[in-house]
Structures are given as C-alpha cells and as structure tokens.
Amino acid sequence: MGRVEKSIEIKAPPEKVWEMLALDRHREWDEQMQKSLKSLEYTSEVHTPADKYKVGATAHVNIEGMGMGEVDFEITESLENEKMTIHVKKPGTNQTAGVMTFTLEPLEKETKFTCIFDYQMPWGIFGKFLDTLFARRMEGKHIEDCLAKLKSILEK
C-alpha cells in the first residue's frame, strides 16, 4: 500500500478547518475534484449539518478521470475538531481503494492540518513500480495543492 503524508499550518481555529471536512465540501479545496466531479450524493441519513461528520456517513461519488470513476466514501472515524478518517471503496464491494486521514492539531494561533492518504495500487508488482516511479509523487503534489487551496480559503 502506498502512503503520502503532508501537513500545513493554517491561521484558523480547528473548528473552521473541521467545517471543510464534510464530504460535500472537499470539492471547494480540491481543484482536481472541482474539474472532474460529476456527482456527489449522500447515501446516509443527513438530517442536520452535524450528520455529515459522523461515523457511518456515506456518499456515492462519480468522478470523471483521476482514475476513480464511481466510488463510495465512508467516514470510519470522527473526533470533532481533531481527526477524521474516510475509506474510499469501489461501489458494491468491500474493497478499499484508499484511506484518507485528516488530523487537526491546535497551535497558538493556528491549526496544523495533516492529510495522510494510504492507497492501493492495482496491477501487483507493476503497480508498485508505477507507484514508485509516478503515483506517489503525483499524489503528493495533488495533496500539497489541496492543502494550499484550503489554507487560502480559510485565511481570507
């Protein structure tokens, strides 16, 4: 399994950063998702805004390109203003394609936000080769861009 971990310090309290972690808000700070997202629909009950952050919240996502297609997101860990873990699965399977973990650490006047993405490359040994050669670097750059965009939104 491949792993990319990136952090950034954002001049905003953890509560403000946390608000951006709802599944339907990711596209605001993920420009690749903005360009490629065809649809995102919650598949779990959402009666209040807080329901979007609870363990068990799920969404079906259709992303054109980015090698994803249709995927299901499920929040598997949620500690308000501290940590969220989201599993990305292929629909109709229990096969995890990736796991995103977000941690928020309060600092004096800002929040250290860390994104860890653990992912499974297909194609066995060939996939491992591609990961070493391209995928890890490309995914690292993508996450850095997302974190910079999130920072710019929250520091306005």
Image: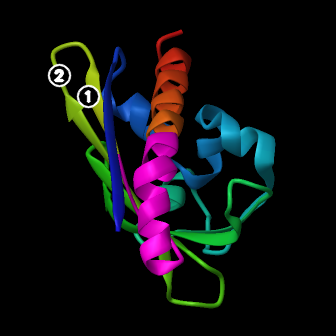
Q: Quadrant of the C terminus?
A: top right
Which residue is label 1 attached to?
Answer: 112
Which amino acid type is shown beneath numbered disc 2?
A: Leu
Q: Which residues are magenta?
A: 116-139
In this view, the residue farthest toward the top is 156
Q: Say if 147 sits above or below 99 in the image.
A: above
Q: Position of residue 65 (x, y in %)?
A: 76, 55
Is residue 88 covered in magenta? no
Query: In the rendered image, which quarter is residue 38 located in?
Result: bottom right
Report the front residue among 32 and 140.
140
Residue at the spot 69% in from the left edge and 45% down from the top edge: 33
Which residue is label 2 attached to?
Answer: 107
**Is residue 109 in view from this perspective?**
yes
Query: In the rendered image, which quarter is residue 76 located in?
Result: bottom left
Give the label, 2 or 1, closer to the camera. Answer: 1
Residue at the spot 49% in from the left edge and 45% down from the top edge: 139
Mark 2 near mark 1, Cβ–Cβ under 8 Å?
Answer: yes
Q: Quadrant of the N terminus?
A: bottom left
Q: Say if 84 sits above or below 31 in the image.
A: below
Count numbered badges in the picture.
2
82 relative position to 85: left or right: left
Q: Say if 97 sits above or below 129 in the image.
A: below
Which amino acid type is shown beneath numbered disc 1?
A: Lys
Alpha carbon separation for disc pair 2 and 1:
7 Å
